[in-house]
Image: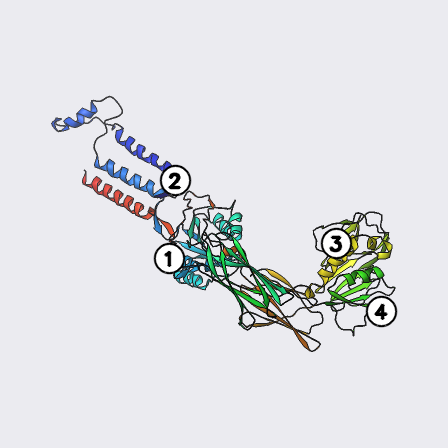
């Protein structure tokens, strides 16, 4: 039994007040009567001198007390456990993360959760409303305070599980905000408790009103591919496959490597102890642009994490063009040592007819227009439409890195570097300062017109930077950051995240092909395209056409590792209501509560009617 409004118990004071009325002695008047024989019992009470009289057995008193007690009970809103909503306004939150794809018997956890939520909707009583929220990577409100069962059921039917993660904190925060602004609201969460990271996020969360966690699923045995990498070797492509066992029992199975045409390239047996990982290596795989690994474990709860694609490490070299009218021996040697670039040296600025390059390095000169490709500008000497040059200034202070963990200045020691003079460049949209000397920016980096750019304000000859160990480290960092398209494959990625895809400079047409075969034209300028990865795992293909030839590159999207840990967890959230509920429903039934207020009010009215009839009949 639950009491939804215990604060109204104060109305019970009406009971002693009614009793007191029957204890008070009645006021009498002097009247002349022919005889007192019929008034003996009345005379006995008149003879008492006390203001109180003995409580007599009275049917009217009992009926009045019964009506009062029933009314007070109605005010405190008693409720009994029942299947259905837990409040007049119930917020239903359904988890659609990857772990909800785990199969429990004939159905998935997601199907169990939707069935339990459907039961709540079908048992809606008059006056109850439902707000339906999808707990995905971003929470989404499908129906707000809906009372139409058909609309709510259609919204539930439109939900689908996704291979990505769910932001439980954001979903619970949204539900808490809704209940905080609407008294008499409660929250029901349908899911398996989410990933370990989500479980850490739930601490400190609270909702006002009752909270009920309806758990979906019991199994925790699952094996998954944690990593799959390939790279060229001496005798062929080498592959490394890591298999993780998240269950409590050892698991055995078979791992198979496929080529792009689904041909079997290699097979290996594996055995992984409970709660541990096992690495399986493959040697002498035939050369292929992509590889697919599939595991078949004996005990497994989630099939979606048993497959993963791998794109071999790119071994090609990029093209770098160094434009230096005076020549710069330090800079040329530093670019040559990078190893991933073929360096071409020029003394004049490009006139716009040259082909695209992966990296343009301008030493002491500034082009009128940005060329196709990423750029490194050293000691700019003039103002252009894209460069806000503001003259030169002497440097008095020592250089200092503002972001030591930035990839461009990581491991670069600026303490022993001295700079005599530098160019001054005003703030530029998309560019961030990395190194400063006092109030003057020495190194800036960022994005301009869709291409990556690094600006070094000072001439290398006006400093001892080339003589320090920091110089080759900085040039290695800069070349890697500016020419990443030729050094590493794209991705991999997980659904929902934003992936920075490096583009081939100068390509005229680009097409992205999804795992299901759907094609999308890529309209992007520069050397980087920010792609919001959809909720679709598998192999993606990017085709770029440049100078009459087509270049194909691949990247893989796979389920987040955290979703492979399918062990159910209880989602205990603080509740501010008097009807606080945190019980875990293992059977997936949405246990709510049914108020008895209406029945009690009807009984009280019936008692009042009976009391009136008794009074009329003079009992």
Sequence-wise, which precedes: disc 4 or disc 1? 1
Quarter of image, res 364: bottom right
**Residue in the foreground of this view, choosing between 149 and 32:** 149
Whether residue 147 is visible to the viewer of this picture, yes or no, is: no
Q: Tell me the CA gap for discs 4 and 1.
A: 75 Å
Q: Tell me the CA gap for discs 2 and 3.
A: 61 Å
Residue 556, relative to residue 182: is it above or below? below
Q: Secondary structure under badge 1?
A: helix
Q: Tell me the CA gap for discs 2 and 1.
A: 29 Å
Q: Position of residue 612 (x, y in %)?
A: 24, 42
- The residue at which mark 4 appears reads as 348
Q: Residues within 10 Å of mark 3 (few under 14, many from 20)?
A: some
Q: Nearer the viewer, mark 1 or mark 3?
A: 3
- The residue at which mark 1 appears reads as 119
Sequence-wise, which precedes: disc 3 or disc 4? 4
Sequence-wise, which precedes: disc 2 or disc 1? 2
Q: How crowded is mark 1: few (under 14 residues within 10 Å), some or many (20 or more)?
A: some
Please identify the quadrant where the C terminus is shown: top left
Q: Where is residue 404 in the image (x, y as percent from the top left)?
A: 72, 50
Residue 16, relative to residue 253: is it above or below? above
Q: Tell me the CA gap for discs 4 and 2.
A: 86 Å
Sequence-wise, which precedes: disc 2 or disc 3? 2
**Residue in the foreground of this view, choosing between 262 and 490:** 262
- The residue at which mark 2 appears reads as 6
Quarter of image, res 474: bottom right
Q: Nearer the viewer, mark 2 or mark 1?
A: 1
Q: Residue sitting at 81 percent across and 61 percent down?
A: 333
Q: Residue furthest right?
A: 326
Please identify the quadrant where the N terminus is shown: top left
- The residue at which mark 3 appears reads as 433
Q: Position of residue 383 (x, y in %)?
A: 82, 62
Q: Nearer the viewer, mark 3 or mark 4?
A: 4
């Amino acid at each position: 039994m639950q009491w939804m409004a215990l604060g109204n118990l104060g109305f019970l004071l009406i009971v002693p007040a009614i009793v007191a009325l029957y204890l008070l002695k009645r006021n009498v008047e002097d009247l002349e009567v022919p005889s007192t024989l019929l008034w003996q019992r009345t005379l006995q009470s008149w003879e008492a001198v006390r203001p109180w009289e003995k409580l007599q057995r009275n049917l009217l008193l009992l009926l009045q007390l019964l009506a009062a007690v029933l009314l007070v009970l109605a005010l405190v809103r008693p409720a009994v456990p029942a299947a259905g909503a837990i409040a007049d306004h119930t917020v239903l939150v359904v988890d659609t993360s990857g772990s909800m794809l785990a199969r429990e018997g004939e159905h998935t956890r997601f199907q169990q959760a939707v069935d339990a939520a459907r039961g709540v909707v079908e048992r809606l009583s008059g006056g109850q409303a439902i707000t339906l929220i999808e707990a995905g990577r971003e929470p989404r409100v499908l129906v707000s305070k809906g009372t139409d069962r058909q609309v709510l059921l259609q919204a539930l039917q439109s939900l689908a599980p996704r291979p990505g993660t769910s932001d439980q904190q954001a979903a619970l925060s949204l539900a808490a905000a809704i209940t905080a602004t609407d008294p008499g609201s409660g929250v029901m969460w349908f899911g398996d408790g989410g990933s370990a990271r989500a479980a850490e996020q739930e601490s400190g969360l609270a909702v006002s009103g009752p909270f009920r966690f309806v758990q979906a699923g019991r199994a925790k045995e699952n094996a998954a591919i944690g990593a799959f990498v390939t790279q060229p070797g001496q005798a062929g492509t080498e592959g490394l496959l890591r298999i993780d066992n998240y269950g409590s029992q050892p698991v055995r199975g078979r791992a198979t490597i496929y080529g792009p045409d689904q041909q079997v390239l290699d097979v290996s047996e594996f055995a992984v102890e409970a709660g541990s990982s096992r690495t399986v290596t493959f040697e002498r795989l035939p050369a292929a642009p992509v590889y697919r690994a599939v595991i078949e474990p004996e005990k497994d709860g989630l099939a979606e994490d048993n497959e993963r694609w791998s794109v071999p490490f790119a071994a090609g070299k990029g093209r770098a063009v160094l434009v230096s009218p005076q020549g710069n021996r330090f800079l040329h040697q530093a670019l040559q040592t990078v190893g991933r670039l073929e360096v071409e040296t020029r003394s004049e600025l490009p006139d716009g007819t040259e082909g695209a390059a992966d990296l343009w390095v301008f030493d002491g000169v500034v082009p009128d227009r940005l060329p196709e490709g990423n750029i490194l500008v050293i000691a700019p000497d003039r103002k252009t439409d894209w460069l806000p040059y503001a003259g030169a200034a002497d440097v008095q202070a020592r250089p200092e890195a503002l972001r030591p963990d930035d990839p461009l200045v990581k491991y670069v020691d600026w303490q022993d570097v001295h700079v005599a003079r530098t160019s001054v460049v005003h703030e530029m949209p998309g560019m961030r300062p990395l190194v400063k000397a006092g109030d003057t920016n020495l190194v800036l980096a960022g994005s301009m017109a869709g291409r990556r750019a690094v600006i070094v304000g000072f001439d290398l000859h006006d400093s001892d930077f080339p003589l320090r160990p920091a110089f080759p480290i900085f040039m290695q960092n800069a070349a890697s950051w500016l020419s990443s398209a030729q050094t590493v494959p794209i991705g991999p990625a997980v659904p929902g995240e934003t992936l920075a895809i490096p583009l081939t400079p100068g390509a005229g047409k680009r097409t992205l092909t999804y795992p299901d075969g759907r094609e999308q034209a890529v309209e992007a300028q520069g050397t980087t395209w920010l792609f919001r990865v959809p909720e679709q795992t598998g192999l993606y293909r990017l085709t770029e056409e440049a100078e009459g030839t087509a270049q194909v590159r691949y990247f893989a999207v796979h389920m987040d590792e955290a979703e492979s840990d399918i062990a159910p967890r209880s989602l205990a959230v603080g509740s501010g209501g008097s009807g606080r509920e945190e019980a875990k429903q293992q059977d997936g039934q949405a246990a709510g509560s049914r108020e008895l207020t209406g029945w009690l009010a009807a009984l009280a009215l019936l008692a009042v009617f009976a009391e009136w009839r008794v009074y009329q009949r003079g009992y």
